[in-house]
Amino acid sequence: MSTRLIASFACCAFALASAAPSDAATRTWTGTIDSYWDTPGNWDTGVPQTGDAAILNAGPNIELKDSTASLDTFNISNGLTLSTRGYRLKANNSNEGLLVIDGTGTTVFTQPAIGVFSLAIDTDDMLIANGARLDMADGIVQVDDQLTIGANGSITGFGTLDMRNDAARPEPILANSGTIEAIGGSLQIDTVNGGQLDLDGTGAEDGQGTLAVTQNTDTLTIDATLSDTFNGHMSVGMGNTIAFTQPLALSNATLSFVVGPEDTPQPGTPYTVITAPLVLGSFGSILADPYNGHIPYVTRVMTDRIEIITATEGDANADGQTDSIDLTTLASHWNTSGNTWSQGDFNNDGWVDSIDLYLLSRNWSADPQEPSSLSWIDALDVPEPASFGAFLIGLGTLAGRRCTRR
Ligand SMILES: [Ca+2]
Ligand SMILES: [Ca+2]
Ligand SMILES: [Ca+2]
Ligand SMILES: [Ca+2]
């Protein structure tokens, strides 16, 4: 949590503990009459007014029948849900409004507000934490100051998240240690007056944040400057893309390439998962649904995008090269069964044998200077596993051995 947001909490706590102005009150939801915000009997001391603090932590789930007054603080927790139902939720009084969505299952559902700008939420600060979720269904969520998505917090859905602070703010105006996921359409994050977004967590949580878009033709667009090198997690479906309008730097980030049951990825076909005006670095690892159950994916980093493509036969470690590292791997599992792609079994029959060696040699790519025929085996400086010498000696009789062992 940012120091500023902590300061906001402290400020709120102090305001609540000390003598509040006579025209501001803390009003707690009881929900004893029905599910509607506007029903006076649903609150311990009546419907919250401008400048009030609203606490919602018990009772039935809540729906708006009109826009809320401009609250100072709005705290929803304990697994409750609130639906805006086309009205506007406002926590924007005196530039210090704070909307907190906290706790497992606690969810605010937004639909675009009735009237100008389709504004569903207008808040100064917002915190989503501890398993809570903001679920958007089109429209705009406007954060005038700072948004913090804590560990296990998430923003999901589609629409526009409008970050309106200015570039003078030293710390990022969005800090995401949880998940931002486009579901059901296009989700876009804009900055109106500049400022930086930290999409992978801040401080000790750097690397914790996730960006995701995995379904149908959904898109996730980050139309803002990023605060730092991204070393968090991205989850992208086959046919989906995360689009950055500013340069993206990656280091030790992980990618989950999600292939759904309806998807039929084609060998050798590149799938674009990231676009950006400039891409620096790449993913440190790919957590991929394996194609055909055994072929891993490799990343191809272009200047303006990152593509995912199935590995070439022979590329045991799926680094985009078929070279002496892969040959060493193959040799160390030579003539053994129960192997996988990463151990040198490229035709998925469990054995590492002459067929796999042939597939490897056909795609040899490490060094253009290397001869492409099997004669390069002698030229390589390959550490010799115990079985590799035997492999070289027995190379001429491999076909016969392979036939007799079955
Ligand atoms: Ca960060
Ligand atoms: Ca980082
Ligand atoms: Ca390789
Ligand atoms: Ca094999």
Image: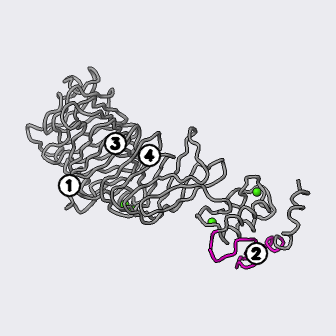
The residue range painted magenta reads: 365-390
Crowding around mark 1 (Cα neighbors within 10 Å: few <14, some 14 to 19, many 20+) is: few
Foreground mark, 3 or 4, reads: 4
Instruction: Tell me: is circle 3 under 8 Å from ligand 1.
Output: no
Foreground mark, 3 or 2, reads: 2
167 versus 239 height, above or below: below
The residue that label 2 is drawn on is 375
Secondary structure of the residue carrying tag 4 is strand
Crowding around mark 2 (Cα neighbors within 10 Å: few <14, some 14 to 19, many 20+) is: few
- Could you tell me which residue is drawn at 53 percent across and 47 percent down? 258
375 versus 239 height, above or below: below
22 versus 266 height, above or below: above
What's the distance in space between the residues labelled 1 and 3, CA to CA?
28 Å
Dot 1 or dot 3, earlier in sequence: 3
332 versus 3 height, above or below: below
- Could you tell me which residue is drawn at 38 percent across and 47 percent down? 220
Looking at the picture, the colour scheme in use is: one colour
The residue that label 1 is drawn on is 193
